[in-house]
Amino acid sequence: MASNSGSSSSSDRQRIAQQRLRIIAGHLQRSEDGDSSSTVLLAAECKAQESQKTAGCSGEEKTVPRKRHEIMKWNGWGYSDSRFLFNKKGQAEFTGKRYRLSGMIIPGLKDWFEGTFGASLQHKTPATPVLTSSSVPPPTLNEAFVEELKSTGIPFSLEAEDRVFRAHGHCLHEIFALREGKFGRVPDMVVWPNCHNDVVKIVELACKHNVCLMPYGGGTSVSSALECPPEETRSIVSLDTSQMNRILWIDEKNLTAHVEAGIVGQDLERLLNESGYCTGHEPDSMEFSSLGGWVATRASGMKKNIYGNIEDLSQFSDGFAVVNIVRTDNFFSLSLMPKAERLHQGQPPLLQDEEPWVWSPEVTMKIRPMPEYQKYGSVVFPNFEQGVACLREVAKQRCAPASIRLMDNEQFKFGHALKPQVSSIFTSFLDGLKKFYITKFKGFDPNHLCVATLLFEGDREKVLQHEKQVYDIAAKFGGLAAGEDNGQRGYMLTFVIAYLRDLGMDYYVIGESFETSVPWDRVLDICRNVKARIVAECKDKGVQFSPLSTCRVTQTYDAGACVYFYFAFNYRGLSDPVHVYEQVEHAAREEILANGGSLSHHHGVGKLRKEWMRDTVSNVGMGMLKSVKDYVDPKNIFGNRNLL
Amino acid sequence: MASEAVYSHRDPMLKKRDDFEDILEERRNSSDLRYALRCYTPVLYKGMTPCKANTLKSMVLQSNQLRYVISQVSKETGRATDDVREDASAILEEMAHSLQLSTVRFFAFTLSKVFKTLFRSICVNEEGIQRLQQAIQEHPVVLLPSHRSYMDFLLMSYILYTYDLALPVIAAGMDFMGMKFVGEMLRMSGAFFIRRSFGGDKLYWSVFSEYVKTMLKNGFAPVEFFLEGTRSRTAKSLTPKLGLLNIVMDPFFKGEVYDVSVVPVSISYERILEEALYAREMLGVPKPKESTSGLFKARKVLSEDYGSIHVYFGQPVSVRSLAQGRVNRCQFNLVPRHIPGKPSEEIQNFVNDTAYRLVRAQEENMVLKPWVLLASLLLQNHHQNQTAGQERGIALDELTAQAVWLRDVSREYGAFLNWPGVMTPSEVVSSSLSLHRGLLEQGASRRRHSRRGALEPGSRRPLLRLVQEPGAARLHPTGPAASAIHAATSNQKQEVFNSFSFLRNMFSNEFILCPGATVQDFEEACYLLVKTRALQVTQQEVLVTERGQRTLAFLTSMLDPFLQGYQVICRFLCEEVADTLTEKQFIPAVRKFIVKHLLAGRLRYTEVLSSDLQKNALAALLRLGAVRKIKGAEPGTLKVNAVMVNSLEDTLGGKLPMQKAVSARL
């Protein structure tokens, strides 16, 4: 299936690119079996992209079109054609063709769903099906700005659909409101700059006419960063960067690439792959989130152990246009935060990178040759404590694979419930045997055991060697290798989790994820306490069924780890579920901070976590941030009011 | 949920208390041996399996905190780390419990026998037991029983064993360990031993705190200790000691556990085993050293009837909810948690307040027996007759009538009174009196108060007991309020409040008074007195009603011995102390002075002889600055500010208006 992508010479590079694509497809896309069209299509698309490069600032047929709502859900996650649903037989299935899980039946999900949340398929809470434009507030326009903008020829829109789509990220309260057909303040117009120069023109006009600009990248923010400040009286213009999605040049000598900031993760990776390179930056949202957003929030990709987090990747950003892009920086409390390692390397604590202050339409970033070999793996531990001890040891020996994640027991069960129907009796027999071996022979308690998922990358020999090293360490902590399949499914979970939330919301279940970074000695404590706090708060606020409260350790650093929490509950019987949800999330964040966790690891502060900024960075820190903002953007043109 | 149990409720009468169940009844009807050998499978915190004593020790020795302190001590003293570790290990050996089920079973058997002969019943609130069982599964639990008798911790373990609950590990004073054989028995039943004072010994403190924390954090067993630190010999609660409470809260502050449940337990004895001993101590005879032979000699107490015991397991209190908004746990984020540090002021205040609240919670659930009421009536009658020079004694029917009155009053004040409903009042009175026969004399037709002179201890003891008990916690606001009304020169509310505040301040070493709650207590007292129609309170004035005269007189006379006691001590300091004296000299000297006055008949209350009261008074004077400790000279040298002491004495005696520097206004 590799070389049918068309015209040019099927060079080595092209071949490697195809291979690379398959690897990504491994945890993103539907795999080779039968339908290889999606892969082919993607590869074909890149060629088109290549040719467009010469065509300058005009573009069409993008992964992310201007009219996003044509292929994506306006009130949920991801592509319109992909969603979970319970079919007539009551079995869960995933629609569409895009993913590995697409078109498959997931037999275990219903029982897990009903058992965990006390939800029932009889009780539905369907979303408002269509967006009624009349209920969207009419735009407040700055006529002079609009007139001058027209003369530049930069495309813009005043349509309700476009404006609503850019008025939100993916926080629970935002999606919940959309599903109910409720809209708060939405941007008054959307513009689509096509290149650097367009951005310059727009910002100049905005300054001239005093218009508020809110950059919009992938729209995957989970920090309320895209919410229009209700107190904003000026016209709000959403600056959608999706059309700025080209790789401008690749420097193979220095292994850097210069890229427009609007490019989404999957495009960036695909385009680089074609040239035989990759960034290796794979955050869970990489299908939709944009480079600009990553830089602004200090994103962290799952393979950061090899490739680094975004701040290690991006070298220069050509910053001119003022403060605060889509989401804002996550600062670390000046305690023993992993990322605070950089403090010890002599960098000043606050203004170490300029990204949060300067919105960069273009970014120069490091690239790497594509890895030759990739392998998943997993390890079962008798309990979470042992698992954490093992991860700590791996971090200590600095031999972490590209990705290593530890799921707790609840999440392991969750992942298990997502197992697609097995095709052969043999596989199910084998599964049964595995289960028997682990629980009966090895004596692991199925209610305590937990799983670490692994991903190795590099050249084949090294990967195998590395794998052995990691498994040896794991064995010291009672870990048993549990196969590639479990590992792969673990990563799949993180890509489909947002789709699953939409399913939950159809049946009275709401949920969210949040993250933190924490020193190693507190990992266990923070996991226990935050989970317990969530359960206690839910009970306290009248949630009838015990919530799902689960966590995983997703990144390891020398001094600490990143911990990710999922939390969801059944809201039947609550009059104001979103408020309850917000109270619980607030309490959970307080618990995180009280237990030595940071305000955010990679989601950013936005408006959601702004209230803790002062405690985190101190008055002096706030003063410094404020004065930078005042210096760079005295008229508050980039007025999304995040962070400060 | 649980926090409300500690914060006092506005209306005590609405307070619902659980019913009691007698656990001895079953023992009387079935085999003790089978009971001692029955299957015992308590549930533990989060389904933990119990931990061997040796595993626990090695966990402590390997803990980061201890390792850190060991290396520090070794650096400071220049000794080898291994030596210091040996020391730590020896300390741990001396301290650690070695709970063994066989010993527990032995105790279960023998205690069943002993309890059945000593007590009529041991009543336990089963709902409290259920709450405790729930709490043990959810969070690490700390049990805080009141401490009036040696029996307390054996009794606690006995009850927990009976209900198939996890056996606690108990912090006991080192003096028990001095008792041959018995010490080891106690150790095997779950006691661990701590030195009474180890202020400067960093290593000791570290081993000790780590030991307690390890047990608590891992939820191996509930940790039990006595907030008051030692047995209260006066039946009044003692000022709580904060060290252990600090230690058990620490894992919560540092996020090592999600929460800690603290369960106050109130144990009320109808008659304490040690009553003779305490009564002697109250007259200043020092406490004898604990020894096995002493215990053996004391076996004669086994032949008497000690009535019933009531054990009330209070509402588990969540440290988390208490600390909510009061303690900022982020303060531990910047320093590695195993490095020991002095608790911040915020935490000290919090622990201190919590300790007081917990002691109050214990007091509130103390059960009052009819005898307590009778004793107070008898004593007041005795004192009144003494002053009036009348014939001593009181007629039985008069006593009964008064007791009924007092019963109703104390119920109104929310006292937890255990007055048998099925008996007529006179039956109740005679049954109570028969239990304490030794303390009373009976004339041909009248019950007489014992007349064996001022040094007859038994007759005096109940009063002090009573001070703590009628309406337990209720007395504290109302008692001083009543005295304040009595003492105030006018009916002005502000003036009454000033007096109240003065008395409260004066006696805050004597009674358990929550720090900083003066206004709240005053309002609560007024509320109660108004509610029972003893007072009328307007914007400006406080008026005693017709109906209230008797109640207030009663309450006032409860506080009288203390007023007089403090007054005498002030007088002593003014008259006898020329310049300075040492702390050691204080007690004997003041005793001599008091005895002189007693014999001369200038003093009514022999309670003043109690060394406890004398020490408290001195502490109060030190706190108020009327007496100062001077540095330099012999340690513990005291200097008296004669003017101030003089004015305090006059104020107490009612010669001066009580104008305590009032910072808190109404």
Image (cartoon, rainbow, N blue to C red):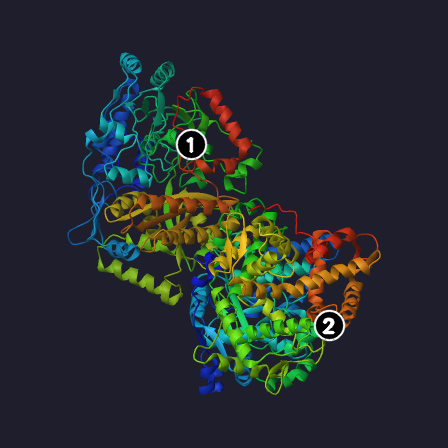
Q: Is residue A315 visible?
A: no
Residue identified by numbered label 1: A328
- Kindly identify which numbered label has been placed on residue B286: 2
Amino acid carrying mark 1 in the image: Thr
SS type, badge 2: loop
Element class at badge 1: loop
Q: Tell me: residue A394, above or below residue A631.
A: below
Q: Is residue B122 visible?
A: yes
- Outermost residue, left direction? A88
Residue B159 image point, x, y percent: 50, 75
Residue occupying image coordinates x 49% and y 59%: B528
Q: Are marks 1 and 2 on the same chain?
A: no
- In the image shown, does B433 or B328 lie closer to the viewer? B433
Where's residue A462, x and y in %? 44, 45
Q: Residue at x 60, y 76 (%)?
A: B272
* Above or below A349: residue B369: below
Left or right placement of residue B205 versus residue A76 in this view: right
Vertical comparison of A382 with A149: above or below? below
Q: Relative to B593, is A575 on the left or the right?
A: left
Quadrant, the N terminus of chain B? bottom left
How many C-alpha atoms fall within 10 Å of the one at disc 1: few (<14), some, or many (≥20)?
many
**In this view, B462 is above or below A285:** below
Quarter assignment of residue B476: bottom right
